[in-house]
Image: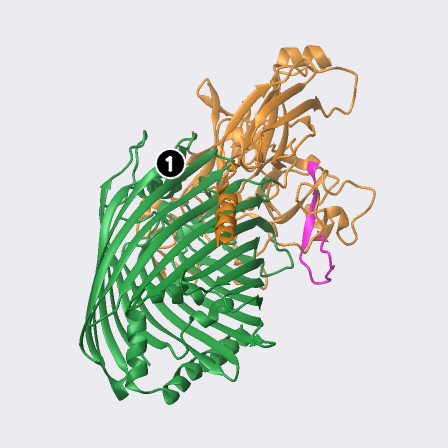
Chain colours: A orange, B green
Amino acid sequence: MKKLLSILLLATALVACKKDKTPGIAPVDLPVTVSYNLSTSAYTLPVNNIKVKLININTKTVIEASTDANGKVNFQQISAGTYDIDAVMEIDAAQYSQLTGTPTTQKVTFNASMKGKQIDAGFSGELELKLISGTAGNWLIKQVYYGGSDRTDGALFRDQFIEIYNNTDAVMYADSLYFSQLWGRQSTTAARHHFQANGQYDWSKSTGMPANIDANNDYVYTRSIFMIPGTGKQHPVQPGESIVIAQTALNHKSPFTGNDGKTVSVNNPALTVDLSTADFEAYYGDLPGRTPFASDIDNPNVPNLTVIQFYGNDMVLDNPGRDSYIIFKVDGTSVVSNLPSYSEPLLVPSSTANKYFQLPGKYIIDGIDVQPNTTDSRIPKKLTANIDAGFTLTPKGSFTSQSVIRKTESTVNGRRILKDTNNSTEDFDVFDIAQPRGFK
Amino acid sequence: MKMKNAFLAVSLLLCFHSSFSQQQDSTSVAVSVRNKSFAADSASFALYNFAIKSSFFMNAIPTGFNVITIGHKYADGDYIAGQDAEKIQQTYLQTEGKTILGDVALWGAFSFQNIKEDSTRWAHQTRNNLSAPLYFGSPALVSYNRRIYQFRAAANRNMIGNKLPVGLGLDYRIGDHYSTNDPRGQVSDYQFNLSATLGYQFSSRFKAGAGAHYGYGQERTNVAYKNRAYFESTVYPDYVNYIVNGYGAPFPRAGDRRFENNQTRMGFDAFLGFVDDALGDINIKTSLTREDQDYRFRSTSTALNQELNDYQLNSYLIDVVWNKKIGDKQLTAILNYSNIDGSDYNYSYGANNYLYNQNQWSAKLLYHKAGKTAWNYLLEVSKNGEERQDGIYGNVIGYERLNIKPGVGLILQRSAEQSWGVHLSGIYSMAVAERFIVPGVMTDRFTQQVILHDYLYHTSDFFGGTLSGEYSFPGYKKIQTSIRAAVSYQDVLNFRAINSMVTSVPGNNRVWADLSLNFYF
């Protein structure tokens, strides 16, 4: 019996020993090297004092640092996690002209970005960022109202619009300016495609894609294309002014009678916008074989866009924010409707898969990536860093009346110059209620 | 699932057959009264509750002890943990019994619970896996309905001249948990566990054995909304669905709100049984169990099943029961120790982030004196503790509590078939140790409503008690029938202070009531 009790006590003592443990997640060092993605080595640009920003996309922690003389920065003892990493270098006009021998009157901004980079607990490598300069904007995407307004009390998505701005000090003509929604990976929980390392579709694997082109970096793939009509000088836009392109050019605050003869009212007009004075609208009633939404009413006072490529029953912008938007013009060598088109790079190719126009990136004047409002719904970027190194979003999400609006950088003689660093994360803000022709 | 439902139906039939076949063999009043008396004998019943946990100790279960209970429980009060519900209504049916078929002893039990919770938040979970590192939750209060079926069975046969006791056990539980308002969580789960024991009877006084157990199960969680605005935007913050992955501020999960948790577990057991008229009977059980839980996003359209978290639980326990009969008196002492360690692998970070520990010991003494006026006495001292760590946020929250529980009860035998019983117990519980490290900003709602709330709840001191009464009488076919009512109450003595603004604080008291109808046959 004594033995039994001894065994019992020993067993109890053994199991009672409790070790102090700590979680396996330990901070890691993250060295980053920043350099320029230059096609020529005829000149050297400074690599010191480049601003590098690290954003933990889950905890929202932001760490900023600047590079040393070798373009290096070491983020020490950061938490493992998923990060957005952005680098930006602004070189003023005089210095840039001096260094490169290329005269310029505007500062030149270089961007590099790496979005959604997972830094594991055992990370021991080094990240390299390549700075790319973008085209200084003349036409700019100023405002995109893609979220729509409340399903019950607002106008749903029929009040969507996009606003394009003349950011120069000269009159520009909007004739033959194109606006497009881009296509790419819309969900991270589908695995029927070939993907690049950044998670985006690997378009080079699309059926029929030529092997001698960089299908992923030199082109974008369009979901829709609209063109502003005109003969060349029919639609002047004054410096510091903009054009508003409406899905449907109505005063959405007021009741209207739809194509089906039914009258629709808005419970809370304050949630939506008046687009009756929009400059252009998209009308699908003229498209052969297409039945437009009941809300797609043709306003005779507002010119219609020329619809080159479309989907659905009206010019609907993706409410959750999975579209990217570009404006572009083509030169005389290209006819947009004759651009080659390719299906998604499906693992199992399908002859009935949708096809998307392949547009050379060189034609893009401005573009922005937008994203869904919650981190878990993020999707890979569709635009490269020379067009948009970041992304913007409406923080409240869909049907909340919010729009993304480009920030004002300065005002010269009453003309607002909007911010354009080719990084929409930095360049854009939010209107809680969209304001056509409004400024932030 | 059809297969499992069919299995459940067959199991139910077997269980009821086992119970009611006893009725045909032993419908005598004496057996029924004996079973009622057995249930009222706290010292014997404590041994019974130990024995039904393993087929190895089936001989400690009286043959022919059968009981059916139908009851309703009610709980109310806001002295609760952050993820509990303020009001709970629970209707239950349970039956269990033991029979002998040839030389095989069989024990079976079935239970059904229908539970309605009025105000659950931050927990689209079953109530069976509370240390889970990953689950969905929202600040909004939701009404949860739970239907849980459980079937347990054990068989034991003593072979080779009663030298080699061989036992088998199974435990199958199936549950459906769903909330009836947005965000509408649905959690379906099942758990299936098998155990086998093999012993050797060294002498008439001493036997030892070893066993193994294996089980598997699954929890599938889905969160949906009737009002689309609640997930299409974050305008309504109460309704935002979050994914909790560890023990820190969770992240919104607006889309793809579904995952599954596949579980497997296995372990080993050791048993000792010692019988001595002078010293009393000593039974010991120890167990080691490893459980692996695999959390993964559940994809409907493709073969892509994104790994979210791997969670491993290692547990061990030791139960020691000593039982001594002296004339019409009986004494049972129970010593118990258990420890559970949980550790996850978080795929988002490629490392272990969450650590969990739960440990408890208890010493319980039960004394029963039979007679026309029978007495039950209870004294229990226990200590329980829990600790959770989150590496990303650096959170470490833990507590240890000491509980003292005395009790006394009496049963008045009015006639051979009629009795009254009343029992009163009290509890005093105090926090004796704590760890509270929350280095980050403590303003997010999960930290406020769960982490800080639970810290305050678990480190509070409280007292309480339970008063129960039971009336037994001969019912249908003279089966001993009892009506039992119990009321419990807890009241807080104090809360710890936190050097931060707290928006969610536990209330001061909670009350439970339980009314049941019991048939002993």
| Residue B493 place in picture, x, y as percent | 22, 41
Q: Which residues are magenta?
A: A344-361
Could you tell me if residue B58 is visible in this image?
Answer: yes
Give the total of numbered labels: 1
What kind of element bears circle 1?
Answer: strand
Counting other residues with Cα less than 10 Å from the Cα at mark 1, is it few (<14), some (14-19), or many (20 or more)? some
Question: Left or right: B166 with respect to B59?
Answer: right
Q: Residue furthest front?
A: B278
The quarter of the picture where residue A389 lies is top right
Give the image location of residue B392, x and y in percent. Answer: 51, 35
Whether B505 is drawn above or below B101: the answer is above
Q: Nearer the viewer, residue B28 or B521?
A: B28
Q: Can you tell which quarter of the image residue B109 is in?
A: bottom left
- Inspect the magenta stretch and tell me whether residue B244 lies in it: no
**Overall secondary structure of the magenta stretch?**
loop
Residue to which mark 1 is pinned: B434
Instruction: Residue at the far left: name it.
Output: B414
Q: Position of residue A385 (x, y in %)?
A: 64, 32
Q: Residue at x 46, y 65 (%)?
A: B275
Output the chain of dot 1.
B
Q: Looking at the image, which residue sits at the far right?
A: A212
Q: Residue at x 68, y 27 (%)?
A: A129
Residue type (three-letter) at the residue carrying disc 1: Glu
Residue A54 position (above or below residue A243): above
